Image (tube, helix red, strand yellow):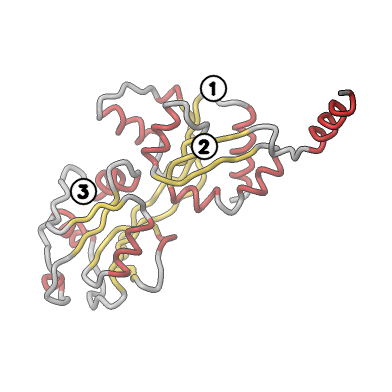
Amino acid sequence: MRLASTLILAASLLLPSALLGEVKMAGSTTTFLTVIKNAKEQVSKETGSAIVATGSTTGKGFAALQAGQVDVALSADSLGSLIAAANAKGQALKAEDFEEVFLKNAHIVAIVHHDNPVAQLSEAQILGILKGEIRTWKELGGKDAPILVFFEGESSANHNLIKARLLKDAALGAKRLTFVDNVRLIASNVGETEPGFGLSPEMYLSSEVRVASDYKISQHLCFIIRKDASAEVRKVLAAFKAKL
């Protein structure tokens, strides 16, 4: 019995420090891939915390934070915008209950298939496509084909950001509109569909698509935590930020 106790004690002393605590993170795929993915193992070693992180959407991450399912929401929009959007849907959140840790800015750009002959789109033309006022590429000097729009679902920060910055009070009116579950699917769908069009973060672009406008929308990448977040959580976030 004494030998067994000794072995257990010895094993516990040899446990890697990463097993001493756990910090859960979820939300924006863009923030996950930009900030978390490549630095996760190093930050875990430096802080002694096991980091469990997944990328989905900003909305899902913020909802998980409110429900106490994660310690950190990964966001591609500011805390103020998230609070305003949540309260517009009937919630009663208070900004003072949360805290934002700003990371960096990224950009959303208008993309088309690499074989699309339309060289340049103006902001007004992009708006016209999303509102459904421009429905074919022929209207823009391209082929006689319908414009197939790929757009993120409502739980994403990009969905709300584009509506706020570009559409403003206008509704999405594109006749051929497909909502995707993950921001990465916008570029991949446009790359596989010659009449395709979408607004995608720059980090997901490939040789199959082409940026078709100088117009850009800035993304606000950040961490969102509760005001009473632990010292361990704050230490992990500081370590990630230091690697940018």
Number of other residues with Cα within 10 Å of mark 1, as a class: few under 14, some 14 to 19, many 20 or more: few
Q: Disc 2 or 1, which lies upstream in sequence?
A: 2
Q: Amino acid at mark 2?
A: Val
| Cα separation between marks 1 and 3 | 36 Å
Q: Secondary structure at mark 2?
A: strand
Q: Secondary structure at mark 1?
A: loop
| Cα separation between marks 2 and 1 | 14 Å
Q: Secondary structure at mark 3?
A: helix
**Pointers 1 and 3 in contact (CB under 8 A)?**
no
| Whether residue 108 is situated above or below residue 6 in the rendered picture | below
Front residue (pair 122, 140): 140
Q: Disc 2 or 3, which lies upstream in sequence?
A: 2
- Side of 117 where 15 appears, left or right: right
- Side of 141 where 218 appears, left or right: right
- Side of 29 where 159 appears, left or right: left
Name the residue: 32% across, 50% down. Answer: 181
State the mark number for residue 228. 1
State the mark number for residue 167. 3
Image quadrant assignment for residue 143: bottom left
Front residue (pair 77, 193): 193
State the mark number for residue 148. none
Image quadrant assignment for residue 139: bottom left
Look at the image and tell me in which quarter the N terminus lies.
Answer: top right
Residue picked out by circle 2: 101
Name the residue: 26% across, 69% down. Answer: 193
Q: Residue furthest front?
A: 1
| Whether residue 109 is situated above or below residue 22 in the rendered picture | below
| Cα separation between marks 2 and 3 | 28 Å
Number of other residues with Cα within 10 Å of mark 3, as a class: few under 14, some 14 to 19, many 20 or more: some
Residue 227 x/y as whole percent:
51, 24
